[in-house]
Image (cartoon, grey):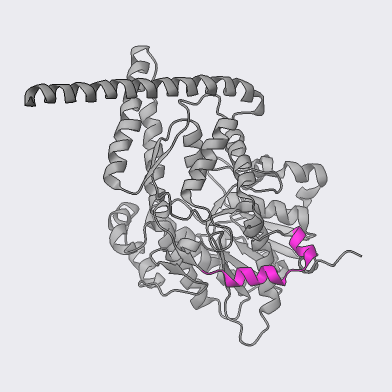
Amino acid sequence: MQETSEILNFYHSKNVFVTGGTGFLGKVLIEKLLRSTEVSNIYLLIRPKKEKDVYRRLEELFECEIFDRIKKEQPKFEHRIKVIPGDCSHSGLGLSITDRQIITSDVNVIFHVAATVKFDENLKRAFNTNVNGAKNVLEIAKHMKRLKALIHVSTLYSNCYLEEIDEVFYKCPHSYDHVGATLEKMNEFEAGELTPRIIGRWPNTYTFTKALAENVIKDSAGTLPVGIFRPAVVVSTYNEPIPGWTDHMNGPAGVAAAAVSGVMRVIMCGSKDVADLVPVDTCVAGLVATAWDVAQNHKKADQTIPIYNYVSSTENPIMWREFSEYILVYGQDFPVRNALWSAFMIMTKNPIVYFLLKSVLHVVPGLLVDGGRIIFGKKPKMMKIYKKVHRLSDTISFFLTHTWKVSNDNTANLWCKLNQRDKDLFPMSVRTVHWLTFFRNYIKGVRKYLLKDPDSTLQKARKRNSFLNLMNAVSKLLLMFFLGNAVSWIFFILYRKLF
């Protein structure tokens, strides 16, 4: 007899409210809830855009490959999605009176995923979305009559100025109310100019505002059934619903895409630092289980707001050197059709060495290629590409050159609470991830979903890659020959001069 799933029982006929559902993590969360649970409805908050209304944005959401599996298995899944026009940064989430009444009377579970994840976002915009968004979700949650759990998705790096990160709240040196009042008096340009002074020890506006948002939760949640979920670096899917899926160039995916394309040759990165990567599908499984756990424990008298650090570094760690090796190895197996050069990667934490190598390996070749394009009457493009590559490298370098000691007891204990049925349905443990398998699918996914290189071009790409590898070997031999001869001539001249 099959064991009963406690998590499925919890979600059965429940109504779930999701913010940030059109983002990377949000898409996988929605797909998992629809495919693996019997939720009654998912109320999806979508922000209208000037050129697209919320219904067009919903259509685009379901055009994503991540929903291909559920379209085959449950063709009528869309009837469980209820679109709610609104905006987290607006008071009351910008809801209409009717939608507010529906949400406050029907919703049982909230996943607050919405955030601006741009590291270099203007501080005023980041504050409005990340901090005010958390405030506004809490405000409406306090009026929900049937709420069982509210999960606020934060980030492991909300307190990244520390060397050790535990599953506790950390006091922020600035009051979020004071920061908000200060920013209210400024325009975006002024906020940008004063950002370094305001954020202090934080490396960017994203981590700073996520820290402030956690303090909003701590101070304002009251008796609400709230939990905070802190994932590390979220990368592509491991298994579900399709292996290797990703849809954004931020972080490691951008590095992998640039490396296998032969564009990025050097990066500011510590090869021996830990790459705290978590696949998005195991992350979502943990997120879904977290809401169940919060609901079970909320009635306990001594229950405080639980924090779940979701990481790989404590149970299944890899280093950035391994990350580089894996993407280069599988980049040879699954090469890109229009790769500029055969892939290789140099990592350094030394800013001077990085600047010199960047100049030699990126800037000079980029200028030469653009010069050639101009001569042949084509529009130059390489330096624009390298500008994006260098911007990516600069924005993530802090996280590639540091290692944190992290505790994840709450997350590990949650995994132990699950019975075997729930572990099979919601495989949240990063310990089960086989990194070789993951990176093989990761590079295939980067190639297919980010670089839009279909599987049909693979044979042609492999032939071209063989030619690039040959050219690379020849260029190395020529370089060694000329350098060897140059050194020989220098010694010969010195010998003649001295003797």
x and y percent of residue 81 in the render? Answer: 73, 53
Dominant secondary structure, magenta = helix
Instruction: List the single residue furthest toward the right.
Output: 1
Left or right: residue 320 versus residue 350 is right
Instruction: List the single residue furthest toward the top.
Output: 376
Q: Residue at x 32, y 58 (%)?
A: 195
Viewer-nearest residue: 311 or 40: 311
x and y percent of residue 222 in the render? Answer: 56, 80
Above or below: residue 386 compared with residue 272: above
Left or right: residue 247 versus residue 420 is left
Instruction: List the single residue furthest toward the front.
Output: 499
Q: How many marks?
A: 0
Q: Residue at x 67, y 56 (%)?
A: 432
Q: Quadrant of residue 402?
A: bottom left
x and y percent of residue 371 in the render? Answer: 32, 19
Which quadrant is the N terminus positioned in? bottom right
Above or below: residue 215 compared with residue 456: below
Residue 103 visible in the snapshot: yes
Q: Quadrant of residue 248?
A: top right
Residue 422, magenta (yes or no): yes
x and y percent of residue 400 in the render? Answer: 42, 51
Residue 313, magenta (yes or no): no
Which quadrant is the C terminus positioned in? top left
Left or right: residue 212 versus residue 134 is left
Viewer-nearest residue: 388 or 335: 335
Instruction: List the single residue furthest toward the left.
Output: 498
The range drawn in magenta is: 407-425
Residue 53 visible in the snapshot: no
